Amino acid sequence: MLFSTKQDLIDHLKGAASCNNSDVHLENEDALRDKALDRLVHNAVLNPTAEIRGRSRFAIKSLAAQQGIVPASIQDLYEARGQGKNKGYTVPAINIRGMTYETCRAIFRTAQACRAGAFIFEIAKSEIGYTHQRPHEYAAVVLAAAIKEKYRGPVFIQGDHFQVNAQKFHENRDKEIEGLKDLIRDALLAGFYNIDIDTSTLVTLEPEDVKEQQRLNFEVGVELTQFIRELEPEGVTVSVGGEIGEVGKENSNEKELRAYMDNFNERLAAVNPQYKTISKISIQTGTEHGGVPLADGSVADVQLDFETLEKLSQISREQYHLAGAVQHGASTLPAEMFHKFPELETAEIHLATNFQNMIYDSTHFPQTLKQEIYDYLRKQFADEKKANWTDEQFIYKTRKKGFGNPFKERFWNLPDDIKAKIGKELEDKFHFLFEQLKANDTRQYVDATVQSVTVAPDLQNELEHA
């Protein structure tokens, strides 16, 4: 399954593509999809040799570009939304922690079936860490899935919650910001042309003045946005997201939105009046990432503040010309809630934990592997268990960490029939969500607004980040 040498990779692609150092040329699409691709993406992730991982990723990205599969920014679509040129849908942004290839394939199949174009693949800073999926790897897997499912067009890959750690920031500001800039740089080089910078962790409610409460949020947010604008590829305007309320904390309000946006825009214009501002704003409406597990491991009901979501989304569109408000921590909400988001003109909704839960709880997932993962978590992360938690609550909150090492390869090497069955379950869920969010038939809006710019894959870049 794994290539031992560069020549093994070249030989494997024969009949599908020619490969000569930095030149990869597609010869037969069907042969690529049917015979070569699965092993190629496997090596892009798991090969023990960095050179072969890098060359495999370069081959995938080159072959994707030759088939019109292009990493893109959703900026143009969101600008049109902010100008009132289209409405009535919510963009699903899907965090993928494990079984990434199968999950992405299920999403692309869903998109093909319902003519969706506005959907996002994303991974958060924290998820990059505990799932061991760096940006270059993640992007390669997403694009490989697009090739496999015959998708064509712009593919939106997003860095989610590129977040400042408040404690580390106050201990050593420069070190924390430089670390985040390094991640942003890697993400841009990998093809992440949508980045949500999260400096809401720096909000403090101690001052009475709302501007002072939000000061570090907008000041550091502008610094990071400037950094992105200086590095974005020629012809690409990265879609940058801002945030005014940390998810799981106090609900957001209009004063906070205005204080953040007015001062953010003023400071960014002072840096460079040509720089585009953020395209959307994340707010807090009562949710918590992953939901709140009860003693039996089930998830507590959420009192989501739809009034705040609707009001702040409207203000952000009509007065600041953003796409609207973003809802985080939503995948575990009751099914009957999802139709509300497009009705309230929510711009984007972030979905993660429920797909993770579906994988673990699937009747097709090997019970022996699940028990092995849970036993590992109980031992490795015992210090994260709160005194009042049951074992079910502890497992619910920590099993996201089971997707990384040492089990990452085990997930990738699950039998094909098991992966296919779980992929079908995920696909059914995506169909439901896309329909409820009115994301179906959004390809027309993407085609009318998004100007994809093909950034040529760079072999050296892939080798350096393998």
Image (tube, grey):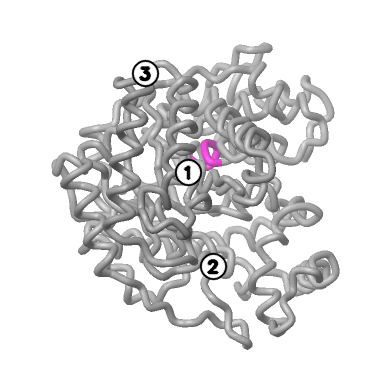
Q: Earlier in the sequence, mark 2 or mark 1?
A: 1
Q: Up-down: is 418 above or below 228? A: below
Magenta stretch: residue 144 in it?
A: yes
Q: Up-down: is 234 above or below 322? A: above
Q: Earlier in the sequence, mark 1 or mark 3?
A: 1
Q: Secondary structure at mark 1?
A: helix
375 left or right, relative to 222: right
Q: Amino acid at mark 3?
A: Gly
Q: Main secondary structure of the magenta part?
A: helix
Camera-side mark, 2 or 1 = 1
x and y percentages locating residue 459 in the rendered image: 64, 17
**Mark 1–mark 3 CB contact (< 8 Å):** no
Q: Residue furthest bottom?
A: 296
Residues rendered magenta in the picture? 142-146
Q: Which residue is mark 2?
A: 290
Q: Residue furthest front?
A: 208
Q: CA distance from mark 1 to mark 3?
A: 30 Å
Q: Which residue is mark 1?
A: 216
Who's the residue at 47% across and 59% down the image?
Answer: 206
x and y percentages locating residue 77 in the rendered image: 27, 38
Q: CA distance from mark 3 to mark 2?
A: 37 Å
Magenta stretch: residue 171 in it?
A: no
Q: Secondary structure at mark 3?
A: loop
Q: Up-down: is 242 above or below 392? A: above
Q: Amino acid at mark 1?
A: Leu
Q: Earlier in the sequence, mark 3 or mark 2?
A: 3
Res 77 label: none
Q: Nearer the viewer, residue 244 or 64?
A: 244
Q: Amino acid at mark 2?
A: Gly
x and y percentages locating residue 320 in the rendered image: 22, 42
Q: Quadrant of residue 407?
A: bottom right
**Mark 2–mark 1 CB contact (< 8 Å):** no
